[in-house]
Image (cartoon, rainbow, N blue to C red):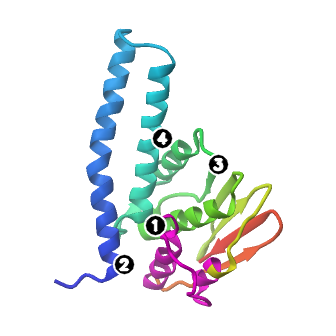
Amino acid sequence: MGVDNANLAALVGSRICHDLISPVGAINNGLELLGMSNTLDGPELELISDSVNNANARIRFFRVAFGAAGEQELGRAEVESVLADVSKGGRIKYNWSSDGAAARREVRMAFLAALCLETALPYGGTVQILRSSDSWTVVGEGRKINVDEALWSGLSGQDHSAEITPALIQFALLPEAAREAGRRVSFDQTVDKVSISF
């Protein structure tokens, strides 16, 4: 049985997301029923509902970012739905600028790049995902940009000295996913903007 480490990580991510999405959905359905029956109302129910919706959105996002890519495509409406749900109530607002469907492996790389950009936007901001005919650029803008040079240099293979913690796993997965797709990752930074291209 031959599965390399990157694919093994993707399979683990897929399994975790698959197993969590159903119970979170069931909790959400239960909350909707409670809301319709008026047996429980008020800020407590609203807080629980917001938390469940946020968890559901993050799981859907993580399922694409950390799950097995495969060869199938994701439609624009599905991707925009995931990004809209993740944007609700979060410090980062996501915008998708790609017409039509896109290969799941490319959407996966875009989502991994977006997660990298989240780390560079400590006070929030916007992440724009742009697609041209043969490349992708994911741009993060905010009032303060915070880039760890050692960590970010690893994206393009220049430096591998940064410690990868669980919160930073996207910095290890994105270059590997790009390599598998025959692409090269690069990044650029200004005072209020940072972008990742592949």
Q: CA distance from mark 2 to mark 3?
A: 28 Å
Q: Earlier in the sequence, mark 4 or mark 2?
A: 2
Q: Earlier in the sequence, mark 2 or mark 3?
A: 2
Q: 147 or 108: nearer the eye?
A: 147
Q: Secondary structure at mark 3?
A: strand
- The residue that label 3 is drawn on is 93
Q: CA distance from mark 1 to mark 4?
A: 20 Å
**Residue at the spot x=47%, y=21% of the render?**
44
Disc 2 marks a residue whose amino acid type is: Ala
Q: Tell me the tag on residue 6.
A: 2
Disc 3 marks a residue whose amino acid type is: Lys
Q: Tell me the tag on residue 54.
A: 4
Disc 4 marks a residue whose amino acid type is: Asn
Q: Secondary structure at mark 2?
A: helix
Magenta span covers which residues? 151-180
Q: Tell me the tag on residue 166.
A: 1
Q: Quadrant of residue 161?
A: bottom right
Q: CA distance from mark 1 to mark 3?
A: 23 Å
Disc 1 marks a residue whose amino acid type is: Pro
* Disc 3 packing (10 Å; few <14; some 14–19; many ≥20): some
Position of 69 with respect to 172 (left or right) is left
Q: Tell me the tag on residue 133.
A: none
Q: Earlier in the sequence, mark 3 or mark 4?
A: 4
Q: Are marks 1 and 2 in contact (CB under 8 Å)?
A: no
Q: Earlier in the sequence, mark 1 or mark 3?
A: 3
Residue 135 higher or lower than 45, as above or below: below
